[in-house]
Image: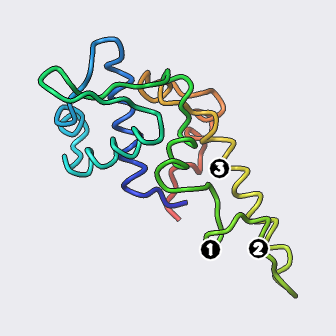
Amino acid sequence: MRVSAKVDYAVRALAELAAAAGTGPMKGEAIAAAQDIPLKFTENILGDLRRAGIVVSQRGAVGGYWLRVPAESITVADVVRHVDGALGDVRGQPPEDVAYAGAAVALQDVWIAARATLRSVLETVTIADIAGGSLPAGVAQLAAGPDARARR
């Protein structure tokens, strides 16, 4: 799986907003600085998240961004879908809509299983989990597995 810079930055920006919840709006500059994200990229991503209904913004001296919905209700899968589109697409199509012939017939099931595995992680981890530094037990166990950090 490849995680785009846009998704990575969006999750990190939302984690900053979740950590600052209840303290008032957070400026885009502060979010960008806290996560070392280019400001223009941060503003574009926050605009996408505002249009998706995840964040709210207010202009002016006391303006900034804050979460529109609780961080506990925003999964990483939600962010991926809002920023990059559907999880596990094959050439821009859902895997169940892709047909193969001959020796590759079973490949459709591979793509469906891969998407199911992605969902099992990304739909269980919330922005609150990330901001709080405490992942769901199953995800933490996967990340701590003996082969989890092997680069292949």
For the point 78% across and 69% down, the residue is 97
For the point 55% across and 60% down, the residue is 1
Q: Does 114 appear above or below 15?
A: below
The number of discs equals 3
Q: CA distance from mark 2 to mark 3?
A: 18 Å
The kind of residue on which mark 1 rests is Arg
Q: Are marks 2 and 3 in contact (CB under 8 Å)?
A: no
- Dot 1 or dot 3: first in sequence order is 1
Front-most of 55 and 130? 55
Q: Which residue is mark 1?
A: 91
Q: Which residue is mark 2?
A: 98
Return the mark for residue 118: 3
Q: Position of residue 119 (x, y in %)?
A: 67, 45
Q: Secondary structure at mark 1?
A: loop
The kind of residue on which mark 3 rests is Leu
Q: Position of residue 137 (x, y in %)?
A: 63, 27
Q: Does 38 appear above or below 151?
A: above
Badge 3 local density, few (<14 within 10 Å), some, or many (20+)?
Answer: some
